Image: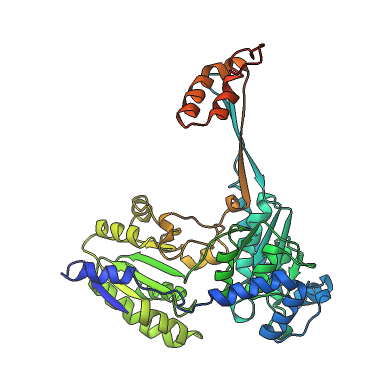
């Protein structure tokens, strides 16, 4: 991992280099994804079956693309009761938090007498992509599907690959708890293509959400415009602000909780104590060998991890805003006061007893968050991603008389005479001699 200090002369170039690291995959998949999307558009279900056999090693017919309710029942029956109970805790809390976000419609009548409004309506159909195999995360099913359901989306179609025909019982249990019954055993770019363009079996949707590999991310990029997407997510990341009063092992485990996601994940500690930074680094080294995913976490920490020592927390605040991390964990004497000064973070976790990992599962706010410094301009997934706004106006002749002349003047200034005439004809009686206004 990298050791930086704001007290050294070379800090700025070293920090700039850290910000500029390319952690995303360098694999170029654009052409391959374009070919897959074109094939699905041309051949529909037949292409989906061919790709499923090729990539998931499962021969299939169009009739079996959708997972039957009986298969879902059988898989869920295998889930241990403790896991079902934990799933229920998470679902209940996620649903409560997201239902609390629902906005109210807006209506006002201004001084000129025009009535203005804004109406919120849910999307008709949403597609949820869920990774399969070892990368399957039931928590992500809840985090993506429950906000859509809370927003009032009528149809949620889920695609999840089933390598070698193996269903993930907890993923299916999470889908059922979130109210998703339309589930297809399709993965990769071909699933995104099916959701965007539709086939004989898979009806198209209006928005696609959910994480995936480089092929899925590129497919989402290419179908954007045909449908909406949530984001093009990159590797996970956390910044932890922690002072010397903390237990180094707790901070070390919190850093490793991000590092174990994948080799490209990034964990950064910012502290005002060089001694504490060294103690945390030592604790990471001691903890790593005990983790089942030690190789992954070790590569992440070695290649992308960092300990940054600052002279004061003012410097820390400025650095966090430049990093704009996906996750921000603050373990200082007054975390709320420090958080109030920070503008850019996907989600924040305040205090010793609010580790980022609890937010991944059961806290309630969404764990689908902006990565790669995009927290400067983007937000985490919410009910707003599944709603759209429609504005409206209403007024009588008196109200139009108040504001209409300005509209005519501006339209004429832009050379749009039909625009000007559209308003002007309503401001005075229409001519009776056949002339124009």
Q: Give the tally of numbered discs.
A: 0
Q: Quadrant of the N terminus?
A: bottom left
| Observer able to see residue 200 | yes
Q: Measuring from the top left, give residue 185's x and y in whole percent.
A: 73, 75
Q: Is residue 294 left or right of residue 182?
A: left
Q: Is residue 9 left or right of residue 186?
A: left
Residue at (66% x, 64% y) in the render:
128
Q: Quadrant of residue 312?
A: bottom left
Q: Measuring from the top left, give residue 45's x and y in whole percent.
A: 77, 73
The residue closer to the viewer here, 346 or 351, is: 346
Q: Quadrant of the C terminus?
A: top right
The residue closer to the viewer here, 354 or 30, is: 30
- Which residue, as the protein is rendered here, is positioned at the far front? 434
Q: Quadrant of residue 299?
A: bottom left
The residue closer to the viewer here, 110 or 173, is: 110
Q: Measuring from the top left, give residue 255's x and y in whole percent.
A: 41, 73
Compared with 429, 219 (above or below) is: below
The residue closer to the viewer here, 1 or 253, is: 1
- Which residue, as the protein is rendered here, is positioned at the far left? 9
Q: Quadrant of residue 333?
A: bottom left
Compared with 125, 242 (above or below) is: below
| Observer able to see residue 111 | no
Compared with 261, 434 (above or below) is: above
Q: Measuring from the top left, give residue 207's x and y in whole percent.
A: 64, 58
Q: What's the colour scheme?
A: rainbow
Q: Is residue 200 left or right of residue 149?
A: right
């Amino acid at each position: 991992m990298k050791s930086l200090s704001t007290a050294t002369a070379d800090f700025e170039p070293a920090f700039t280099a850290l910000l500029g690291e390319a952690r995303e995959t360098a694999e170029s998949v654009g052409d391959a994804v374009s070919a897959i999307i074109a094939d699905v558009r041309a051949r529909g279900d037949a292409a989906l079956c061919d790709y499923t056999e090729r990539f998931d090693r499962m021969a299939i017919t169009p009739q079996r693309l959708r997972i039957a309710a009986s298969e879902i029942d059988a898989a869920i029956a295998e889930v241990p009761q403790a896991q079902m109970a934990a799933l229920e805790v998470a679902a209940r809390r996620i649903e409560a938090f997201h239902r609390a976000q629902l906005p109210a419609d807006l209506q006002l009548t201004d001084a000129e007498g025009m009535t203005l409004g804004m109406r919120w309506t849910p999307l008709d159909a949403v597609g949820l992509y869920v990774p399969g195999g070892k990368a399957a995360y039931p928590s992500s099913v809840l985090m993506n599907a429950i906000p859509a359901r809370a927003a009032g989306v009528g149809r949620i179609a889920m695609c999840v690959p089933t390598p070698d025909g193996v269903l993930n019982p907890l993923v299916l249990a999470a889908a059922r708890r979130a109210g998703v019954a339309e589930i297809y055993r399709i993965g990769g770019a071909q699933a995104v293509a099916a959701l965007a363009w539709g086939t004989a079996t898979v009806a198209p949707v209006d928005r696609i959400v959910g994480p995936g590999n480089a092929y899925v991310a590129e497919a989402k990029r290419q179908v954007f415009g045909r449908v909406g997407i949530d984001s093009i997510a990159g590797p996970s990341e956390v910044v932890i602000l922690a002072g010397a009063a903390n237990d180094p092992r707790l901070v070390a485990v919190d850093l490793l909780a991000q590092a174990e996601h994948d080799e490209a994940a990034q964990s950064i500690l910012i502290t005002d104590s060089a001694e504490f930074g060294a103690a945390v680094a030592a604790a990471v080294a001691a903890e790593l060998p005990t983790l089942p995913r030690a190789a992954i976490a070790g590569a992440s920490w070695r290649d992308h991890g960092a300990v940054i020592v600052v002279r004061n927390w003012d410097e820390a605040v400025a650095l966090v805003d430049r990093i704009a991390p996906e996750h921000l964990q603050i373990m200082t004497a007054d975390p709320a006061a420090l958080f109030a000064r920070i503008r850019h973070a996907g989600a924040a976790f305040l205090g010793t007893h609010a580790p980022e990992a609890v937010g991944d599962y059961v806290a309630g706010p969404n764990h689908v968050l902006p990565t790669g410094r995009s927290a400067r301009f983007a937000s985490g997934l919410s009910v707003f991603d599944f709603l759209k706004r429609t504005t409206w106006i209403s007024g009588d002749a008196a109200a139009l008389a108040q504001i209409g002349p300005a509209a005519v003047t501006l339209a004429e200034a832009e050379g749009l005479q039909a625009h000007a005439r559209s308003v002007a004809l309503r401001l005075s009686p229409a001519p009776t001699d056949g002339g124009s206004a």
